[in-house]
Amino acid sequence: MPEQNIIVVVNTRALFAILLALPVAAQQKWDPNSWPPLQVPKLLQAPRIDGDLSEWKYVAFTDGVWDILRIRQTPWYLPAINRLTDHGNEPPPEEDLQARYYTAWDDTYLYFGAEVKDNVNDVDDPAHEPKRWYFKDAICWFIEAPRDNVASSFGQGDNAFCFVIDARKPPYAAWWRHGAPGKTYIEEPIPASAVSYAIRMNPWKRSAGDFILEARVAMAPTLGKSNPNWHKPREGDMYSLEIVHTDPDGGGYGGHLIMYGQGDDDATWGRMLLTGPIQPIERKPE
Ligand SMILES: [Ca+2]
Ligand SMILES: [Ca+2]
Ligand SMILES: [Ca+2]
Ligand SMILES: [Ca+2]
């Protein structure tokens, strides 16, 4: 018998989807319970969703600037999925993608914000499907509500609220991947009545890839639907959080910053504690 030569073509785009979906047991797995919970404050005043975060960013949860150099130092860092890509003329790593993320809540909504420095805005996906936010510039908040100690991937209580950074705001740009009792990976737009968001491109006149995202998602019609055990939010409730920021920048496979988790397995998502309101940082006279 002649030896058969089998050529395996690895589609790196598909690889990312597979890597995110794979259980990370074979890789270096991190334990979110080994970290203090992320403290996400309640807002006393509802933000105006207009692409300007100034009225709430200092009383929201943020832990400052993220880039690939910082991600590399975290316990959840996985070089296969947390990465930047080379298209031949990239800026330094910190200028390829650098962002601050903001998260908060009130009785009705979750609030999401981001201030992002990016070299290229890329929302063009040659194999476009509405659910393929992860092949476009996008930021996604993965939320489990309430947190349980059962590992699952987009099962009951697991939600991803994804915003494609497309200034035209097509219907798929505010996307909801979620579970439900007995169901996983339901893919649909966030119901229009449950979401409001604004994108401001190039806000600092620095790079056409820069943007500010400001969004709110109503909890009852989303979290309440994915999990019948969800109740109206109260201080002290424990949710789970992972932030996934995708950055293809013109290539088939792009950079990815992932904060507080290692992909779709909700057992790797950070603990998110709903706290009362906080005060902004105060400057001292001297
Ligand atoms: Ca605002
Ligand atoms: Ca970039
Ligand atoms: Ca779970
Ligand atoms: Ca980009």
Image: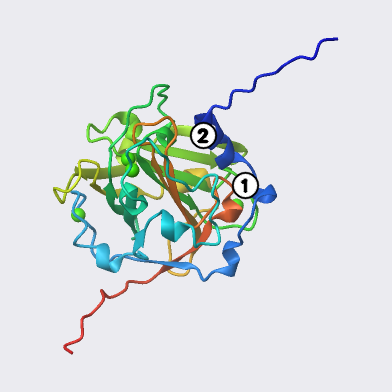
The residue positioned 49% from the left and 31% from the top of the image is: 13
The answer to whether 236 is drawn above or below residue 24 in the figure is below
Residue 96 position in % (x across, y down) = 33, 47
Dot placed on the residue nearer the N-terminal end, 1 or 2? 1
Assign the N terminus to one quadrant of the image: top right
- Given the current orientation, which residue lies at the most extreme bottom position? 286
**Tag 2 residue:** 186
Real-space Cα separation, disc 1 to disc 2, in angstroms: 14 Å
For disc 1, does the CB lie below 8 Å from ligand 3? yes
**Tag 1 residue:** 152
Compared across the picture, whether 229 is left or right of 6 comes to left
User: Which quarter of the picture shows residue 55?
Assistant: bottom left
The answer to whether 125 is drawn above or below residue 48 in the figure is above
Element class at badge 2: strand
Compared across the picture, whether 60 is left or right of 159 comes to left
Residue 233 position in % (x across, y down) = 43, 60
Dot 2 amino acid type: Ile
Q: Splitting the image into four quadrants, where does ligand 1 fall?
A: bottom left
For disc 2, does the CB lie below 8 Å from ligand 3? no
